[in-house]
Image: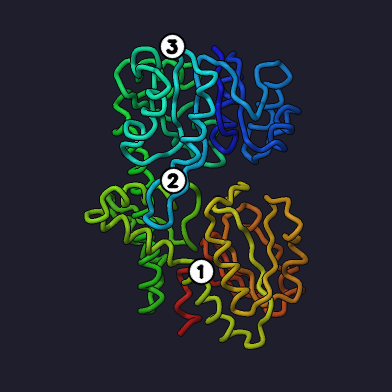
Amino acid sequence: MKICIVGQGYIGLPTAALFAKNGCEVLGVDVNEEIVKKLNQGIAHIEEPGISDAIENAVFKGHYHASKIPEEADTFIITVPTPYVKEDLSCDLSYVISACESILPVLNKGNVVIIESTIAPMSTDEVIKPIFEKAGFNIGEDLFLAHCPERVLPGQIMEELVNNNRIVGGITEECSHKAADVYRTFVKGEIIETEAKTAELSKCMENTFRDVNIALANELAKICAEIGVNALDVIEMANKHPRVNIHSPGPGVGGHCLAIDPYFIYAKAPDVAKIIKLARDTNNSMPGFVIENTGRILAKLDKDAQKISVFGVAYKGNTDDARESPAFEIIYGLRAAGYEVAIHDPHFDNPEYVSFEEAIKDSSLILILADHDQFKDLDYEKIRKEMKTPIIFDTKNILKESDEGVESINFGNLYKFIH
Protein backbone atom coordinates (compact mmCIF):
# COMPACT_ATOMS: atom_id res chain seq x y z
CA MET A 1 0.00 0.00 0.00
CA LYS A 2 1.27 3.46 -0.90
CA ILE A 3 0.36 6.25 1.45
CA CYS A 4 0.73 9.98 0.87
CA ILE A 5 0.74 12.05 4.07
CA VAL A 6 0.32 15.80 3.63
CA GLY A 7 1.97 17.63 6.53
CA GLN A 8 5.16 16.35 8.16
CA GLY A 9 4.93 17.89 11.60
CA TYR A 10 4.40 16.45 15.09
CA ILE A 11 1.67 14.06 13.87
CA GLY A 12 2.32 13.58 10.17
CA LEU A 13 5.95 12.56 10.50
CA PRO A 14 5.50 9.91 13.25
CA THR A 15 2.48 8.55 11.36
CA ALA A 16 4.57 8.32 8.20
CA ALA A 17 7.37 6.59 10.10
CA LEU A 18 5.03 3.93 11.48
CA PHE A 19 3.42 3.15 8.12
CA ALA A 20 6.90 2.87 6.59
CA LYS A 21 8.07 0.63 9.42
CA ASN A 22 5.17 -1.69 8.69
CA GLY A 23 5.99 -2.18 5.03
CA CYS A 24 4.09 0.62 3.32
CA GLU A 25 5.56 2.89 0.67
CA VAL A 26 5.19 6.36 2.16
CA LEU A 27 5.46 9.83 0.68
CA GLY A 28 5.66 12.70 3.16
CA VAL A 29 4.53 16.03 1.72
CA ASP A 30 5.46 19.35 3.27
CA VAL A 31 5.54 22.92 1.98
CA ASN A 32 8.82 23.65 3.78
CA GLU A 33 11.66 22.95 1.35
CA GLU A 34 14.29 22.75 4.11
CA ILE A 35 12.24 20.14 6.00
CA VAL A 36 11.81 18.09 2.82
CA LYS A 37 15.56 18.22 2.19
CA LYS A 38 16.40 17.05 5.72
CA LEU A 39 13.81 14.26 5.66
CA ASN A 40 15.22 12.86 2.41
CA GLN A 41 18.57 12.70 4.19
CA GLY A 42 16.94 10.71 6.99
CA ILE A 43 17.05 13.62 9.45
CA ALA A 44 13.95 14.24 11.57
CA HIS A 45 13.25 17.92 12.30
CA ILE A 46 11.21 17.36 15.48
CA GLU A 47 12.28 16.09 18.89
CA GLU A 48 10.33 12.97 19.76
CA PRO A 49 11.59 9.66 21.22
CA GLY A 50 12.08 7.07 18.48
CA ILE A 51 11.37 9.32 15.50
CA SER A 52 14.97 9.94 14.42
CA ASP A 53 15.88 6.26 14.12
CA ALA A 54 12.56 5.43 12.49
CA ILE A 55 12.92 8.03 9.73
CA GLU A 56 16.58 7.22 9.16
CA ASN A 57 15.76 3.53 8.77
CA ALA A 58 12.74 4.22 6.53
CA VAL A 59 14.80 6.35 4.16
CA PHE A 60 17.67 3.85 4.15
CA LYS A 61 15.32 0.98 3.27
CA GLY A 62 13.55 3.02 0.59
CA HIS A 63 10.17 2.94 2.32
CA TYR A 64 9.95 6.71 2.80
CA HIS A 65 10.73 9.86 0.86
CA ALA A 66 9.59 13.45 1.11
CA SER A 67 8.39 15.97 -1.45
CA LYS A 68 6.68 19.32 -1.75
CA ILE A 69 4.22 17.83 -4.25
CA PRO A 70 1.77 14.93 -3.72
CA GLU A 71 2.00 11.80 -5.86
CA GLU A 72 -0.48 9.07 -6.76
CA ALA A 73 -1.19 6.76 -3.83
CA ASP A 74 -3.77 4.35 -2.44
CA THR A 75 -4.45 6.43 0.67
CA PHE A 76 -4.06 10.13 1.39
CA ILE A 77 -3.83 11.41 4.97
CA ILE A 78 -4.10 15.12 5.80
CA THR A 79 -2.25 16.25 8.96
CA VAL A 80 -1.92 20.01 8.54
CA PRO A 81 -2.52 22.66 11.24
CA THR A 82 -5.96 24.07 12.03
CA PRO A 83 -5.66 27.36 13.93
CA TYR A 84 -8.69 29.34 15.04
CA VAL A 85 -10.06 32.53 13.53
CA LYS A 86 -9.46 35.29 16.07
CA GLU A 87 -12.58 37.23 15.14
CA ASP A 88 -15.14 34.52 15.93
CA LEU A 89 -12.95 31.70 17.36
CA SER A 90 -14.09 29.31 14.61
CA CYS A 91 -11.90 26.64 13.04
CA ASP A 92 -9.64 27.94 10.27
CA LEU A 93 -9.85 25.23 7.61
CA SER A 94 -7.71 27.03 5.04
CA TYR A 95 -4.72 24.66 5.38
CA VAL A 96 -6.97 21.60 5.22
CA ILE A 97 -8.78 22.93 2.16
CA SER A 98 -5.46 23.71 0.47
CA ALA A 99 -4.14 20.23 1.27
CA CYS A 100 -7.28 18.57 -0.12
CA GLU A 101 -7.07 20.62 -3.29
CA SER A 102 -3.37 19.73 -3.67
CA ILE A 103 -4.15 16.01 -3.97
CA LEU A 104 -6.96 16.38 -6.55
CA PRO A 105 -4.60 16.10 -9.57
CA VAL A 106 -3.28 12.72 -8.36
CA LEU A 107 -6.50 11.34 -6.87
CA ASN A 108 -7.98 8.21 -8.45
CA LYS A 109 -11.22 6.28 -8.01
CA GLY A 110 -10.98 3.81 -5.16
CA ASN A 111 -8.64 5.98 -3.08
CA VAL A 112 -9.11 6.57 0.64
CA VAL A 113 -8.81 10.13 1.98
CA ILE A 114 -8.43 10.60 5.73
CA ILE A 115 -8.44 13.93 7.56
CA GLU A 116 -6.41 13.65 10.77
CA SER A 117 -6.24 17.40 11.43
CA THR A 118 -8.48 18.43 14.32
CA ILE A 119 -11.53 20.14 12.85
CA ALA A 120 -14.83 21.54 14.06
CA PRO A 121 -17.95 19.36 14.05
CA MET A 122 -19.60 19.08 10.61
CA SER A 123 -16.44 20.20 8.78
CA THR A 124 -16.01 16.93 6.86
CA ASP A 125 -19.64 16.92 5.71
CA GLU A 126 -20.08 20.61 5.00
CA VAL A 127 -16.66 21.77 3.78
CA ILE A 128 -14.36 18.89 2.86
CA LYS A 129 -16.78 16.49 1.12
CA PRO A 130 -17.92 19.13 -1.43
CA ILE A 131 -14.29 19.65 -2.55
CA PHE A 132 -14.10 16.06 -3.81
CA GLU A 133 -17.67 15.95 -5.07
CA LYS A 134 -17.01 19.03 -7.18
CA ALA A 135 -14.05 17.16 -8.68
CA GLY A 136 -16.42 14.40 -9.81
CA PHE A 137 -16.10 11.79 -7.06
CA ASN A 138 -19.01 9.97 -5.41
CA ILE A 139 -18.18 9.72 -1.71
CA GLY A 140 -18.72 6.20 -0.42
CA GLU A 141 -18.75 4.70 -3.90
CA ASP A 142 -15.55 5.63 -5.75
CA LEU A 143 -13.81 7.72 -3.06
CA PHE A 144 -13.77 6.94 0.64
CA LEU A 145 -13.59 9.94 2.96
CA ALA A 146 -13.18 9.81 6.74
CA HIS A 147 -12.01 11.81 9.74
CA CYS A 148 -9.63 10.06 12.13
CA PRO A 149 -8.33 12.47 14.79
CA GLU A 150 -5.01 11.86 16.49
CA ARG A 151 -5.03 11.60 20.28
CA VAL A 152 -1.42 11.40 21.42
CA LEU A 153 0.85 12.99 23.99
CA PRO A 154 4.10 14.71 22.93
CA GLY A 155 7.00 12.66 24.22
CA GLN A 156 5.01 9.43 23.76
CA ILE A 157 3.71 9.85 20.21
CA MET A 158 5.38 6.83 18.61
CA GLU A 159 4.09 4.54 21.34
CA GLU A 160 0.59 6.00 21.60
CA LEU A 161 -0.06 6.03 17.85
CA VAL A 162 0.33 2.25 18.00
CA ASN A 163 -1.40 1.44 21.28
CA ASN A 164 -4.11 4.08 21.75
CA ASN A 165 -7.65 3.49 20.53
CA ARG A 166 -8.56 5.24 17.28
CA ILE A 167 -11.87 6.81 16.29
CA VAL A 168 -12.62 6.53 12.57
CA GLY A 169 -15.55 8.61 11.36
CA GLY A 170 -16.60 8.04 7.79
CA ILE A 171 -19.05 9.91 5.60
CA THR A 172 -20.61 6.50 4.98
CA GLU A 173 -20.21 3.12 6.65
CA GLU A 174 -18.05 1.92 3.78
CA CYS A 175 -15.83 4.99 4.22
CA SER A 176 -15.37 4.06 7.87
CA HIS A 177 -14.52 0.44 6.99
CA LYS A 178 -11.96 1.43 4.36
CA ALA A 179 -10.25 3.99 6.61
CA ALA A 180 -10.22 1.58 9.57
CA ASP A 181 -8.46 -1.01 7.41
CA VAL A 182 -5.71 1.53 6.70
CA TYR A 183 -4.99 1.99 10.42
CA ARG A 184 -5.02 -1.74 11.07
CA THR A 185 -1.60 -1.69 9.37
CA PHE A 186 -0.02 -0.75 12.70
CA VAL A 187 -2.64 0.20 15.32
CA LYS A 188 -2.97 -2.30 18.17
CA GLY A 189 -5.61 -0.36 20.09
CA GLU A 190 -9.33 -0.62 19.45
CA ILE A 191 -10.47 0.97 16.19
CA ILE A 192 -13.92 2.47 16.71
CA GLU A 193 -15.99 3.15 13.59
CA THR A 194 -18.56 5.94 13.64
CA GLU A 195 -19.75 8.88 11.52
CA ALA A 196 -17.52 11.85 10.74
CA LYS A 197 -19.35 14.46 12.82
CA THR A 198 -19.23 12.23 15.91
CA ALA A 199 -15.49 11.68 15.48
CA GLU A 200 -14.95 15.42 15.04
CA LEU A 201 -16.84 16.36 18.19
CA SER A 202 -15.32 13.50 20.20
CA LYS A 203 -11.80 14.80 19.57
CA CYS A 204 -12.72 18.39 20.36
CA MET A 205 -14.51 17.29 23.52
CA GLU A 206 -11.58 15.19 24.76
CA ASN A 207 -9.40 18.27 24.81
CA THR A 208 -12.17 20.50 26.11
CA PHE A 209 -12.63 18.16 29.09
CA ARG A 210 -8.96 18.52 29.96
CA ASP A 211 -8.98 22.29 29.41
CA VAL A 212 -11.98 22.76 31.70
CA ASN A 213 -10.37 20.70 34.47
CA ILE A 214 -7.09 22.60 34.21
CA ALA A 215 -9.07 25.84 34.41
CA LEU A 216 -10.61 24.66 37.68
CA ALA A 217 -7.14 24.07 39.14
CA ASN A 218 -5.92 27.45 37.90
CA GLU A 219 -8.93 29.21 39.36
CA LEU A 220 -8.25 27.48 42.67
CA ALA A 221 -4.65 28.74 42.58
CA LYS A 222 -5.92 32.29 42.12
CA ILE A 223 -8.42 31.94 44.96
CA CYS A 224 -5.79 30.54 47.31
CA ALA A 225 -3.32 33.31 46.48
CA GLU A 226 -5.98 35.86 47.34
CA ILE A 227 -7.30 34.37 50.58
CA GLY A 228 -4.01 32.96 51.89
CA VAL A 229 -4.28 29.18 51.53
CA ASN A 230 -1.77 26.66 50.16
CA ALA A 231 -3.34 25.59 46.84
CA LEU A 232 -1.12 22.54 46.45
CA ASP A 233 -2.06 21.27 49.90
CA VAL A 234 -5.74 21.77 49.07
CA ILE A 235 -5.34 19.74 45.87
CA GLU A 236 -3.45 16.97 47.64
CA MET A 237 -6.05 16.71 50.37
CA ALA A 238 -9.04 16.90 48.02
CA ASN A 239 -7.56 14.25 45.74
CA LYS A 240 -7.56 11.75 48.60
CA HIS A 241 -11.30 11.52 47.96
CA PRO A 242 -11.80 8.41 45.78
CA ARG A 243 -13.78 10.29 43.12
CA VAL A 244 -11.81 13.56 42.98
CA ASN A 245 -8.84 14.29 40.74
CA ILE A 246 -8.02 18.01 40.66
CA HIS A 247 -5.25 18.83 38.19
CA SER A 248 -2.10 20.80 38.94
CA PRO A 249 -2.23 24.56 38.27
CA GLY A 250 0.29 26.13 35.90
CA PRO A 251 1.30 29.23 33.93
CA GLY A 252 -1.27 28.65 31.21
CA VAL A 253 -2.28 26.07 28.64
CA GLY A 254 -0.28 25.44 25.47
CA GLY A 255 -0.18 23.08 22.55
CA HIS A 256 -2.38 22.88 19.50
CA CYS A 257 -5.05 20.77 21.21
CA LEU A 258 -6.10 22.23 24.55
CA ALA A 259 -5.46 25.84 23.67
CA ILE A 260 -7.44 25.75 20.42
CA ASP A 261 -9.87 22.85 20.07
CA PRO A 262 -12.41 24.07 22.68
CA TYR A 263 -12.95 27.18 20.57
CA PHE A 264 -14.17 24.98 17.70
CA ILE A 265 -17.07 23.79 19.85
CA TYR A 266 -17.76 27.24 21.29
CA ALA A 267 -17.90 28.84 17.84
CA LYS A 268 -20.57 26.34 16.77
CA ALA A 269 -22.85 27.12 19.72
CA PRO A 270 -21.69 30.27 21.55
CA ASP A 271 -25.01 30.84 23.28
CA VAL A 272 -24.84 27.54 25.17
CA ALA A 273 -21.12 26.75 25.44
CA LYS A 274 -20.71 28.95 28.53
CA ILE A 275 -18.44 26.71 30.62
CA ILE A 276 -16.16 25.99 27.68
CA LYS A 277 -15.57 29.69 26.98
CA LEU A 278 -15.09 30.55 30.66
CA ALA A 279 -12.49 27.80 31.00
CA ARG A 280 -10.61 29.16 27.98
CA ASP A 281 -10.71 32.67 29.47
CA THR A 282 -9.44 31.38 32.81
CA ASN A 283 -6.51 29.52 31.30
CA ASN A 284 -5.72 32.46 29.02
CA SER A 285 -5.51 34.69 32.10
CA MET A 286 -2.71 32.68 33.72
CA PRO A 287 0.23 34.34 31.89
CA GLY A 288 -1.00 37.68 33.23
CA PHE A 289 -1.31 36.15 36.71
CA VAL A 290 2.31 34.94 36.50
CA ILE A 291 3.58 38.30 35.25
CA GLU A 292 1.74 40.22 37.96
CA ASN A 293 2.94 38.00 40.79
CA THR A 294 6.50 37.84 39.52
CA GLY A 295 6.52 41.62 39.88
CA ARG A 296 5.05 41.39 43.37
CA ILE A 297 7.65 38.87 44.49
CA LEU A 298 10.53 40.94 43.21
CA ALA A 299 9.12 44.15 44.67
CA LYS A 300 9.26 42.54 48.10
CA LEU A 301 12.53 40.62 47.80
CA ASP A 302 14.64 42.64 45.37
CA LYS A 303 13.51 46.21 44.77
CA ASP A 304 16.39 46.78 42.33
CA ALA A 305 15.61 43.69 40.24
CA GLN A 306 16.41 44.01 36.55
CA LYS A 307 17.11 40.50 35.23
CA ILE A 308 14.81 37.47 35.25
CA SER A 309 15.89 33.98 34.13
CA VAL A 310 13.07 32.22 32.26
CA PHE A 311 13.53 28.46 32.31
CA GLY A 312 11.56 26.79 29.53
CA VAL A 313 9.54 27.91 26.52
CA ALA A 314 8.09 24.50 25.57
CA TYR A 315 4.51 23.99 26.63
CA LYS A 316 5.22 20.32 27.32
CA GLY A 317 8.09 19.01 29.43
CA ASN A 318 11.00 17.18 27.78
CA THR A 319 9.96 18.24 24.26
CA ASP A 320 10.77 21.03 21.82
CA ASP A 321 7.08 21.70 21.22
CA ALA A 322 6.32 25.38 21.83
CA ARG A 323 3.03 25.63 19.94
CA GLU A 324 0.70 28.09 21.70
CA SER A 325 3.08 28.10 24.68
CA PRO A 326 2.10 30.62 27.39
CA ALA A 327 5.81 31.24 27.95
CA PHE A 328 5.97 33.68 25.04
CA GLU A 329 3.21 35.91 26.42
CA ILE A 330 4.92 35.87 29.81
CA ILE A 331 8.30 36.79 28.32
CA TYR A 332 6.73 39.61 26.31
CA GLY A 333 4.92 40.93 29.38
CA LEU A 334 8.02 40.86 31.57
CA ARG A 335 10.05 42.72 28.96
CA ALA A 336 7.26 45.24 28.54
CA ALA A 337 7.41 45.79 32.31
CA GLY A 338 11.08 46.74 31.97
CA TYR A 339 12.83 43.54 33.03
CA GLU A 340 15.76 42.00 31.21
CA VAL A 341 14.81 38.41 30.36
CA ALA A 342 17.37 35.65 29.75
CA ILE A 343 15.82 32.50 28.26
CA HIS A 344 17.17 29.01 28.91
CA ASP A 345 15.64 25.88 27.38
CA PRO A 346 17.93 22.89 26.71
CA HIS A 347 15.47 21.42 24.20
CA PHE A 348 15.84 24.26 21.69
CA ASP A 349 18.71 25.22 19.43
CA ASN A 350 17.99 28.94 19.31
CA PRO A 351 20.73 31.61 19.22
CA GLU A 352 18.57 33.84 21.44
CA TYR A 353 18.50 31.25 24.23
CA VAL A 354 21.43 31.00 26.62
CA SER A 355 23.10 28.43 28.85
CA PHE A 356 22.11 27.78 32.46
CA GLU A 357 25.18 29.65 33.68
CA GLU A 358 24.59 32.69 31.48
CA ALA A 359 20.89 32.77 32.31
CA ILE A 360 21.40 32.95 36.09
CA LYS A 361 24.36 35.36 36.08
CA ASP A 362 23.33 38.44 38.14
CA SER A 363 19.68 37.41 37.91
CA SER A 364 17.13 38.29 40.58
CA LEU A 365 14.75 35.40 39.92
CA ILE A 366 14.46 32.09 38.07
CA LEU A 367 10.98 31.65 36.57
CA ILE A 368 10.27 28.01 35.73
CA LEU A 369 7.70 27.74 32.91
CA ALA A 370 8.35 24.18 31.66
CA ASP A 371 8.60 20.90 33.54
CA HIS A 372 11.74 19.62 31.83
CA ASP A 373 13.62 16.99 33.83
CA GLN A 374 16.71 19.23 33.74
CA PHE A 375 14.87 21.78 35.88
CA LYS A 376 13.93 19.31 38.59
CA ASP A 377 17.52 18.95 39.79
CA LEU A 378 19.12 22.39 39.63
CA ASP A 379 22.68 23.28 40.63
CA TYR A 380 21.88 25.22 43.80
CA GLU A 381 25.52 25.93 44.51
CA LYS A 382 25.83 27.84 41.25
CA ILE A 383 22.50 29.55 41.87
CA ARG A 384 23.68 30.84 45.25
CA LYS A 385 26.99 31.97 43.80
CA GLU A 386 25.91 33.56 40.51
CA MET A 387 22.49 35.06 41.15
CA LYS A 388 21.94 38.52 42.56
CA THR A 389 19.12 37.16 44.70
CA PRO A 390 18.64 33.35 44.67
CA ILE A 391 14.86 33.14 44.19
CA ILE A 392 12.93 30.56 42.16
CA PHE A 393 9.29 31.00 41.15
CA ASP A 394 8.27 27.50 40.10
CA THR A 395 4.98 27.83 38.18
CA LYS A 396 5.04 24.13 37.23
CA ASN A 397 5.32 22.98 40.87
CA ILE A 398 8.15 20.54 40.06
CA LEU A 399 10.69 21.36 42.80
CA LYS A 400 9.95 19.05 45.69
CA GLU A 401 12.40 20.50 48.19
CA SER A 402 13.90 23.91 48.79
CA ASP A 403 17.65 24.33 49.23
CA GLU A 404 19.28 26.32 52.00
CA GLY A 405 19.94 29.83 50.84
CA VAL A 406 17.59 29.60 47.85
CA GLU A 407 14.03 30.90 48.16
CA SER A 408 11.59 28.57 46.39
CA ILE A 409 8.09 29.83 45.57
CA ASN A 410 5.26 27.92 43.89
CA PHE A 411 1.47 28.08 43.66
CA GLY A 412 1.30 26.57 47.13
CA ASN A 413 3.21 29.20 49.11
CA LEU A 414 2.78 32.12 46.70
CA TYR A 415 0.39 33.91 49.05
CA LYS A 416 3.17 34.32 51.62
CA PHE A 417 5.23 36.45 49.24
CA ILE A 418 2.60 38.73 47.68
CA HIS A 419 0.72 40.08 50.67
Label 2 sits on what residue type? Asp
**In this picture, is 322 found above or below 10?**
below
> Considering depth in this image, is 93 or 146 the residue closer to the camera?
93
Nearest to the observer: residue 137 or residue 391: 137
The residue tagged with tag 1: helix, strand or loop?
strand
Classify residue 295 by image quadrant.
bottom right
Answer few, some or many: residues within 10 Å of disc 2's Cα (few below 14, many 20 plus, some between 14 and 19).
some
| Amino acid beneath label 3 | Gly
* Discs 3/1, front: 3
Question: Which of the image's four quarters has the N terminus?
Answer: top right
Report x, y in % for residue 4: 56, 22
Q: Which mark is residue 110?
A: 3
Would residue 86 appear left or right of 299 to someone viewing this image?
left
Per the image, the residue denoted by label 1 is 410
Residue situated in front as seen by the camera: 186 or 392:
186
Distance from disc 3 to disc 1, alpha carbons, whole Å, reads 57 Å
What residue lies at 51% left-to-right and 69% top-to-bottom?
410
Q: Which residue is mark 2?
A: 92
Q: Position of residue 395 (x, y in %)?
A: 52, 65
Q: Residue furthest left?
A: 272
CA gap between label 1 and label 2 equals 37 Å
